Image (cartoon, rainbow, N blue to C red):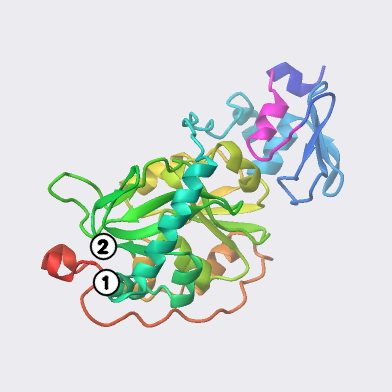
Amino acid sequence: MMLQRDFGVDLLSLASVDTALPGRGMERHGRCPFCGGTDRFWVRPADNRWFCRRCTPRGGDAISYIRARDHVGYRAALSLVGQAPARPAPPAPLAERLPDEAWRGHAERLVTRSQEALWSPAGARALAWLRARALADETITSARLGYCAADGIDGAWRVHRGITIPVVGVDGALYGIRVRRPVPRDARGGGKYISIRGSSGVVLYGTLRGADTLLITEGYFDCLLAARLLAGVDVATMNLCRPQGRWLRWLLGYGRILVCLDTDEAGAKGWAHWSWIGTARRCGLPAGKDITAAVVDEHVDLAAWLAGRLGGEQADSPSPPPCAPAPEPVRGPARDGWLEAGDATAF
């Protein structure tokens, strides 16, 4: 009797934590979690065996899989096999409501008007605030960031004063509009961000170019800044930090996912939603609460930091090619100076 049968380990469930294995029947195949080869990794549920045509043609059982995945010896693998799957289970999925075409048509018109407002005299302070976060004009334009000058009503929607962020998924579709409000907590008790009615709650936001490594940030502005400064990796962010649903097919195709969330309690809770993915690693910054603070306030060389992270993760990984430096922040009030100075300096 095979060793894996003695322990009752479901190898398919174990391996599915680390790579997507779609299909039905006698064999499942997908991207190898060890060498990254596409469609070379196979699991046979009937006899609880696995193999990779490229890196491990002889394959093995659940014990050998845990040894290869966790880089442990036989005894350590035995101690882990009773806890399989060794990684946390995926979080409970959130209800996902997708915008319809009528919503997207209305949203596109609002995004266009907001873009025009940002580059008008009315949006001057909002534009200066974005530039002070080291966002280049090209990035602001390509992300279609905009500005709403006042709370009000637009058709059936309530609109909110602040910087508008079109939430475009990695598939190119518009799923929502988020508003970065000028005051983090006003008299009504609201937070810094609010969504336009009908926006989807879970969206993988960013531009994916087919790199082997994906960097996940917590915020949209962090995502835009990192995407501009870093080459050789893809950069994205996700509402509520919930990797799930339709977006998993993009995420599970990466050989490495570096999760760089804010260095606070919310960031720690957010990491719990990613830790079940076998290729995900938590990635801390050398200084600053988030990527924007690290670059603008602490003068961290983001490309050098990432090269060090990649080198630490895998010795033979090439360093990202050099990229253009961040633009000089606009001189004037501090990025969040309006917190202390009041509404006079708010956007």
Quadrant in which the N terminus appears: top right
Residue position marked by numbered label 2 in the rendering:
149
Residue position marked by numbered label 1 in the rendering:
122
Query: What residue lies at 72% left-to-right and 27% top-to-bottom?
Result: 11
Residue 178, relative to residue 209: is it above or below? above
Checking the image for residue 159, the label placed there is none
- Give the crowd class for mark 1: few <14, some 14-19, many >=20 residues within 10 Å: some
Query: What residue lies at 67% left-to-right and 52% top-to-bottom?
Result: 255
Q: Earlier in the sequence, mark 1 or mark 2?
A: 1
Q: Amino acid at mark 1?
A: Ala
Task: Check whether the beta carbons of the residues at disc 1 and disc 2 lie within 8 A of each other.
Answer: yes
**Residue 12 among those drawn in magenta:** yes
In this picture, which residue range is highlighted in magenta? 8-22
Q: Is residue 298 visible?
A: no
- Residue 303 horizontal side relative to residue 68, left or right: left
- Residue 32 horizontal side relative to residue 200, left or right: right
- Residue 86 horizontal side relative to residue 29, left or right: left
Query: What residue lies at 71% left-to-right and 31% top-to-bottom?
Result: 63
Residue 178, x across and y down, in percent: 38, 52
- Give the crowd class for mark 2: few <14, some 14-19, many >=20 residues within 10 Å: some
Query: What residue lies at 61% left-to-right and 51% top-to-bottom?
Result: 171
